[in-house]
Image: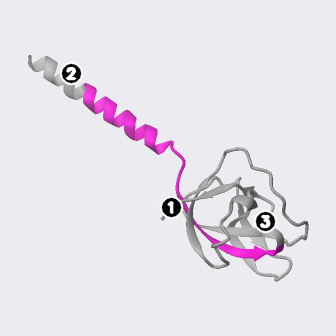
Amino acid sequence: MTMKVLYLIYAIAILSLSDKCNKQTAPGKYKGRLEVAGICMNYTIKLLEGRIDTSRIASNWTDDATGKSYKDVFALGNPCSFPSSIKQGDEFYFYIDTAAEKGCVTCMAYYPKPPKKLSIRIAEK
């Protein structure tokens, strides 16, 4: 009977550990700030909290229009899904969105933005 209890405890421990491992592989929640709200949704977002693979964001980028330098930024990859309520300087939480980008119409005016872009989904507060 004691061995059965030990096996049961062992099985529960294994299941709880595997559940924690699965949660760690779920998409991360990040904190960002809209640094540059350029014309025609040419937006630049700065990563404030969380870790994103450095190959997916620009570790250093300079806005050619202003000469201002930024660290850990990326261009908004899905402008039509970005809420209009978020203004330049606002901080927000987000997830990286791997779903297929929905097509939308944006104007073609150019404003400098980082060479790397990410599609994101804003998280509820």
- Residue ID for mark 3: 114
Residue 37, horizontal then vertical, whole percent: 74, 75
User: Residue 42 in magenta?
Assistant: no
Q: Relative to 104, does residue 125 appear above or below in the rendering?
A: below
Q: Residues within 10 Å of mark 3 (few under 14, many from 20)?
A: many
What is the quadrant of the N terminus in the image?
Answer: top left
- Residue ID for mark 2: 7
Check disc 2 and give the amino acid type.
Tyr
Which quarter of the picture shows residue 18? top left
Q: Name the one closer to the observer, 4 or 87.
A: 87
Q: CA distance from mark 2 to mark 1?
A: 41 Å
Check disc 3 and give the amino acid type.
Pro
Q: Residues within 10 Å of mark 1 (few under 14, many from 20)?
A: few
Q: Secondary structure at mark 3?
A: loop
Q: CA distance from mark 3 to mark 2?
A: 55 Å
Q: Secondary structure at mark 1?
A: loop
Say which label, 3 or 2, has the lower sequence index: 2
Range shown magenta: 11-39
- Residue at position x 82%, y 74% from top? 39
Say which label, 3 or 1, has the lower sequence index: 3
Q: Residues within 10 Å of mark 2 (few under 14, many from 20)?
A: few
Check disc 1 and give the amino acid type.
Glu
- Residue ID for mark 1: 124
Q: Are marks 2 and 1 in contact (CB under 8 Å)?
A: no
Q: Which mark is residue 81?
A: none
Say which label, 2 or 1, has the lower sequence index: 2
Residue 61, horizontal then vertical, whole percent: 76, 70
